[in-house]
Amino acid sequence: MSLILYKTLAGLLIFATSLIAIIYPIKIRAHPKHHRTLELADAFASGIFLGAALFHMLPNAIQEFQLIYKSNLHFPLAEFYCATGFSILLFLERLTSIKSSEFILAYMLTIILIVHALIEGAVLGINTTFISVFIIFIAILVHKSSESFALAVTLNRHHLSLKHIIVIVSIFSLMTPLGILLGTTMAIHLPWQTSQMLIAIFNAFAAGTFLYMSTLHHINHHHHQHHYEGLVEFVCLLIGLGIMGGVAFWA
């Protein structure tokens, strides 16, 4: 199977997963705290995101920058782009603290997830090895369904119409495949050094967004009535983190 075909199938599967995940909350107008299995799956996905960022994407970005600049790089560029990605998502989420309108809260959450989805798709698309694409694909696929579900539930809670919810979630679902297309196009048509630079930047930047989604974002959106619930979620996160560590060890 060619890498382009693999990326195409990955994009279609991610898109389908995103849409399937919204059927249940739209049908019954669910509330997220009633879905313990989903919260555990989200914790597991956060562990995968954390592992993908720390074991794969950030180290790969550091290595790429070192290869591009040889010994002339005297600034931690990979860490800089990683911190930038983390800070941008943190800034966007802080904007949701504005209480002037329920619609502002709903749409700001949508913007955060759309930016994140576009970035992670571009990272998958611009990478040129099967192992890198596979790792990012698994991280996205596991997390995408819970993100779509949570987005649909949040939009329901803010009393948006069914038509608006379907339109918003459809746009969100398209962002990752669009990012894959964008990244793949850049990888094919840009000069080698330019594409390698973009791979390094996207990997570092996305590592920051992955770190944010798996830490602060996860904590802010998971509130527990019992301490053991948080402990079980932490174990699920460790399992996801351990899997990505194992992939890094054997890859």
Image: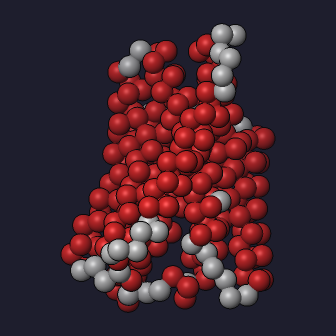
Q: Is residue 6 visible?
A: no
Q: Quadrant of the rendered structure where residue 76 is?
A: top right
Height in image: 181 above or below 172?
above
Residue depicted at 46% across the width and 33% down the height: 126
Q: Residue furthest left?
A: 163
Colour style of the rendered protein structure: secondary structure
Q: Quadrant of the rendered structure where residue 101 is?
A: bottom left
Where's residue 86, x and y in %? 57, 48
Where's residue 75, x and y in %? 66, 22
Q: Is residue 215 visible?
A: yes
Height in image: 246 above or below 80?
below
Judge left or right: residue 12 versus residue 133: left
Where's residue 17, x and y in %? 42, 64
Residue nearer the viewer, 221 or 34: 221
Judge left or right: residue 84 versus residue 20: right
Residue nearer the viewer, 248 or 201: 201
Residue depicted at 55% across the width and 28% down the height: 200
